[in-house]
Image (cartoon, rainbow, N blue to C red):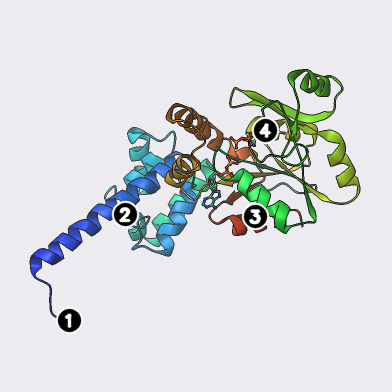
Amino acid sequence: MADRPHPPEVDRAAASRRAVEARRERAALKKDVAMRVISPQELLRRALADPESAAGAMRVTDFLTAIPAIGENKRDRILADLDISPVKRLGGLGSRQRLALQQFLDARLPEPQPRAGRSRLLVLAGPTAVGKGTVAAHIRDNHPEIMLSVSATTRAPRPGEVDGEHYYFVDDAEFDRLIAEGELLEWATVHNRHRYGTPKAPIEAALAAGRTVLLEIDLQGARQVRAAAPDATLVFLLPPSWDELVDRLVGRGTEDAEERARRLRTARVELASQGEFDYRVVNDTVARAADEVAALAD
Ligand SMILES: Nc1nc2c(ncn2[C@@H]2O[C@H](COP(=O)(O)OP(=O)(O)O)[C@@H](O)[C@H]2O)c(=O)[nH]1
Ligand SMILES: Nc1ncnc2c1ncn2[C@@H]1O[C@H](COP(=O)(O)OP(=O)(O)O)[C@@H](O)[C@H]1O
């Protein structure tokens, strides 16, 4: 039964389904590069590691125009300069062409390298719904050596949230006082709504005691920490793909469609700022991502 040949129409239908799926995968990868969820270098590495993969099957023309700020004219000039035919697929590049493309990408879009002399103050930021809260909670529960900072906020507690554990829930007057007295390391209005800030004293005490401290804060806060404590270690959490980020936001079910669209527009801008961070960690599975973040303080 199993080795009897299929009638040709069955083979054709299967081949056409595979072709549609392959096109969908290539389109998703292009989007990931365009949204900066994966770097062009990473996509090229995947293509070269497996020429049969969706990355390997991507045309070099599609690859280049997926990169932000490369349009069709620039693409054609680049291909001519690198002596690569526009009909080539990434997986089919010759070794000289690969090297030329890699060197071009490294020169034009250098991947950020961690700076030396990082401190034990770890800042975890990233776009909405990437899983910052989930990864931070996993670290709190599984890495007792790391202190998770508890922020002050003017938003109301949600059911099940405990004052002093999830947040310090304060009113506007108290938040004003914390700012005025210089008690916050950083603070920001997040998602245009409520104010959130990091109390300074517990962090200074924990760092002085030799502990690692983790802040799970938004991008504006991360930038303020960098300014106030230049040796802090900044970690940017990335989704495995743009589509997965959208699925997580929808799956969480805490925002309506209009708010989700607004957050995704912000997410796109935030992803463009990942180069300001020392490390990028992909939140593929919670435990793996949490362990990778925790290890950065070693
Ligand atoms: N700048 C700053 N951002 C914070 C702080 N605490 C939490 N955030 C950010 O505030 C956002 C909202 O957090 P939360 O109220 O738990 O709501 P959710 O993200 O909708 O679940 C998240 O992006 C957090 O990273 C803080 O102390 N400072
Ligand atoms: N590694 C993961 N795999 C699958 N789902 C995840 C993962 N990390 C987080 N999630 C889910 O994604 C949604 C957003 O996570 P959350 O921690 O609230 O994000 P953030 O704090 O970055 O806004 C939640 O429903 C969470 O359960």
Q: Nearer the viewer, mark 4 or mark 3?
A: 4
Report which residue position mark 4 lands on. Answer: 157
Q: Is residue 4 visible?
A: yes
24 left or right of 295?
A: left
- Give the residue type that dot 3 points to: Ala
- Residue neighbourhood size for the residue with mark 2, other residues' Cα within 10 Å, grouped as few (<14), some (14–19), many (≥20): some
56 left or right of 157?
A: left
* Circles 3 and 1: CB atoms closer than 8 Å: no
- Residue neighbourhood size for the residue with mark 3, other residues' Cα within 10 Å, grouped as few (<14), some (14–19), many (≥20): many
* Circles 1 and 2: CB atoms closer than 8 Å: no
Q: Nearer the viewer, mark 4 or mark 2?
A: 4
How many labels sit on residues? 4
73 left or right of 189?
A: left
276 left or right of 238?
A: right
Q: CA distance from mark 4 to mark 3?
A: 25 Å
- Give the residue type that dot 2 points to: Arg
Q: Nearer the viewer, mark 1 or mark 2?
A: 1
Q: CA distance from mark 1 to mark 4?
A: 62 Å
Q: Earlier in the sequence, mark 1 or mark 4?
A: 1
Say which mark, if any, is on residue 290.
Answer: 3
Q: Is residue 84 visible?
A: no
Report which residue position mark 1 lands on. Answer: 3
The secondary structure type at the circle numbered 4 is: loop
Image coordinates for residue 2, horizontal then vertical, percent:
19, 80
